[in-house]
Amino acid sequence: MLWFFLWVMWFALLFRVIVDVFRDDSLSGWAKAGWTVFVCLLPFLGIFVYLIARGRGMGERTLREAQQRDAAFRSYVQGAAAEAPATGPSRADELARLAGLHEHGDLTDAEYETAKAKVLTAA
């Protein structure tokens, strides 16, 4: 069971290093190819050397990418909320307004019943 856990952990670390190599914009294409070949041909040595040489930047790149994704999501939500059509008053609000007009005497009984029927049948 321990060996299986260590094997799974090793592959997770291997994939994380490979993803980090391709995520880093400061590396040239040749440097990315070199690290990938080094990690694939000599996986144990390649990963250990990568973690020693570039391990500190892995967390910083991960954090920066998460912040960029969060900012993009927030921007999308704010844009979608700004584009959403404004909803009018609810049926209850409209009925309360009609009742107030009827009680004040601005609407007759027939006008009130007609307006109330329109509000209640509106979808």
Image (cartoon, rainbow, N blue to C red):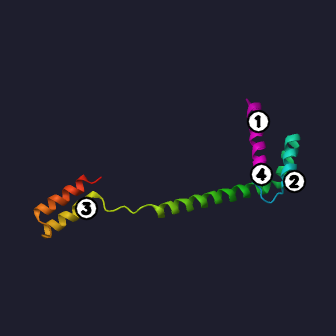
Q: Earlier in the sequence, mark 4 or mark 3?
A: 4
Residue holding disc 1: 6
Judging from the image, what secondary structure is the residue with disc 1 in?
Answer: helix
Mark 3 belongs to which amino acid? Glu
Nearest-to-viewer mark from 1 and 3: 3
Quadrant position of residue 73: bottom right
Separation (CA) of disc 1 from disc 3 = 66 Å
Query: Which of these two is toward me, 65 or 31?
Result: 31
Separation (CA) of disc 2 from disc 1 = 31 Å
Mark 4 belongs to which amino acid? Phe
Residue 33: image x %, image y %? 85, 49
Query: Which of these two is toward me, 22 or 2?
Result: 22
Residue holding disc 2: 30
Nearest-to-viewer mark from 2 and 1: 2
Mark 1 belongs to which amino acid? Leu
Judging from the image, what secondary structure is the residue with disc 4 in?
Answer: helix
Q: Earlier in the sequence, mark 1 or mark 3?
A: 1
Separation (CA) of disc 4 from disc 3 = 58 Å
Rendered residue at 76%/39% (across/down): 11
| Range shown magenta | 1-22
Residue holding disc 4: 22
Q: Earlier in the sequence, mark 2 or mark 1?
A: 1
Residue 69: image x %, image y %? 63, 57
Q: Which mark is residue 25?
A: none
Separation (CA) of disc 2 from disc 3 = 68 Å
Q: Is residue 110 magenta?
A: no
Mark 2 belongs to which amino acid? Trp
Query: Which of these two is toward me, 30 or 117?
Result: 117
